[in-house]
Amino acid sequence: MPNVSKITDALRENVLFRRAMGFAWHIAGIAFCWWCSFEILAIRFEYELDPEFDWAYTEYLWLAILVFLSVIIVFRLYQGLWRFFTFRDCVVTGVAFLSGTLVLALAIFLFNGRTFAGFPRSVFLINFMLILGWEIAGRGFVRLLREWRIERAFGASPDQKRVVLVGKPEECDGLIRSLNRQAGQLGKIVAIVTEEARHKGGKLHGIRISTDLESVGELVANLGAEVVLILPPYTGPNRVRRIVDSVSDLQLKCEFRVVPSVDDITAGKVDVSQIRKVEIEDLLNRKSHDIDFERLREFISGKRILITGAGGSIGSEICRQVLKLAPKSMTLFEVSEFLLFEIERELQAEIGETKIIAVTGDVKKTYDVRKAIDRAGGIDIIFHAAAYKHVDLMERNPFSCFENNVVGTATLAQVAEEAGVEQFVLISSDKAVRPTSLMGASKRLAERVLIERSPCVTKYQAVRFGNVLGSSGSVVPIFKKQIAKGGPVTVSSKEVTRFFMTIPEAVELVLAASAIGEDRRVLVLEMGKPVKIDTLARKMIELSGFVPDVDIPIIYTGLKSGEKEYEELLTDDENVTRTEVDRIWVVARKSEAEKGSLDIGHLLELIDEQKEQAIREYAHSLIPGSRLMDGRNDSSSGKVAAS
């Protein structure tokens, strides 16, 4: 016995069959509505009509069918997919049949000897309303049947998540329509929240609307919702924080998700896969900044660029953003074979006309650096992002720290001068300010290596900024892994604060700072307000759908060696002036000669002799405001003490 569903599906996919059935529906509707028009008129006059009216019904039936079928063809109503019938289709159908009614009236007027004698003119109006109802009702029924089948297939189930939707009603409507077929994957929407007071108490798609953003927590609690889905323009940091706080204040388990683009909603292009989790970056109240991208393009376009540490968090983002500015060539210099392979493969997909040169090498080795520059046929700008950055790890590896961060920078700078490089940009750190760690001290000395060089063809800059979210070794990916394992989340102290910005934002500002062209200067990025790491950890737990200290414990481990409770971007004796670029400051010129000159040769001797305490003391002697020796004494054996 043949499979009935397969036969039905085959017929539904057959265009000729669908068109034939459609025309049959139209012809039946035209004939039926024409008959009903006269029948309604007869009932209205209790069947006491002129006998000629009966003649008029049969005489002009063929003409009605011909005219209305012609209208259906001209307006291409036969091409519309009934399952996706919309309000616009209603309007087009109305215009089409109004036009057909006028044409039919004119034709009957002419066929009847330029008169309507013997023909009831009210039939035209009755027939128009009936046939319009027939066409719209038929299509509407098919659409309702389709939506009923979808709802039945993806309807609420015991394990389906309940969703509170936050956004403007217009965007909510677009999202619900766009995701209609994927309703089961999205979940069951149980409430809509907006700040537009005029919609208070209203309903959208049968879902009640609330107009109080702070009520999200109560709705989640009362309706048993497990997901809060946030639509633009409610995806800004302040509103997202208010929504998250309203839920976390009640200690509720809930996931938070966002739809990133209004355009995708209005275009009906939203897919469940585009709905992402709210990340900690969404809660950062970062000020917007104006970047002159034309100036950046002039600075980079047609230049030969070398990026050290090209596979790292900052280095790889520099590669991505520089590539968009159309350099002549871009040399990726990286000591890690795997990271170099990954970034080269990523960039090759978007290469354009830029030549990508991948070079394995070590910034401490003169030969490797020269090889990279020679392979590019010379270099115009170097972005030096290669560095050891992990504070605690560098406390336990002081010799590698200074050799890589200080000696490596000096080696790279020397080769850059010899090769006639126009500009050298060092990626520095806020940990270089009043350093308590060897890593911070090494970055401060790396700044001095550049700033104190003798005048030459190469311009030197150091760009100093704080932590970036999501970089390798930062707290965010560590917290994510700890939360994924069910905890505990480890925080060094309740009072520890750090400056944060996103990686793309930091790199945009680094490029903008580089384009300023200040020679032998330290530029500082405005980082905004510091964030408590404890608060950061708790928000990340909440965003993952857990309750801090209940589902995921937080453990305070104490400050590690070299760590500070708070970071600084400037020392008290460093004066800054605002540059013409928003959120970028430049440290006033000053000499640190009173603390002595940095002797790379002497530093190498201490590294070769493995004198840890001597390196610490030497770095301390060279840095104003250094706190490297806090809690230590002269008799220290060289073992790193906890700060």
Image (cartoon, helix red, strand yellow):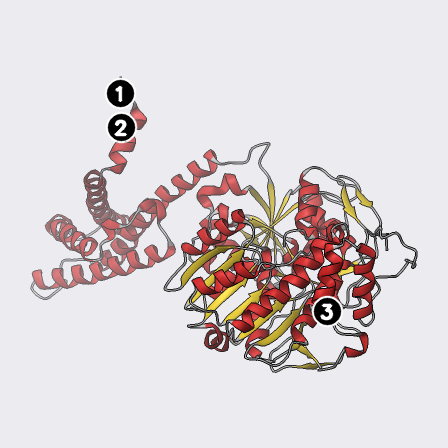
- Residue 261 visible from this viewpoint: no
Q: Secondary structure at mark 2?
A: helix
Q: Position of residue 604 (x, y in %)?
A: 71, 60
Q: Position of residue 60 (x, y in %)?
A: 12, 52
In the picture, measured across the screen, residue 217 lies left or right of residue 40, that is: right
Q: Secondary structure at mark 3?
A: loop
The disc at residue 70 is none
Mark 1–mark 2 contact, CB under 8 Å?
yes
- Look at mark 3 in the image and give the residue it sits on: 599
Q: Identity of the amino acid at label 3? A: Asp
- Look at mark 1 in the image and give the residue it sits on: 2
Q: Secondary structure at mark 1?
A: loop
Real-space Cα distance between discs 1 and 3?
90 Å
User: How many other residues sit within 10 Å of disc 3, few (<14), some (14-19) or many (≥20)?
Assistant: few
In the picture, measured across the screen, residue 105 lies left or right of residue 281, that is: left
Q: Front-most of 341 and 228?
A: 341
Q: Front-most of 333 and 557?
A: 333
Q: Identity of the amino acid at label 2? A: Ile
Real-space Cα distance between discs 3 and 2?
86 Å
User: How many other residues sit within 10 Å of disc 2, few (<14), some (14-19) or many (≥20)?
Assistant: few
- Look at mark 2 in the image and give the residue it sits on: 7
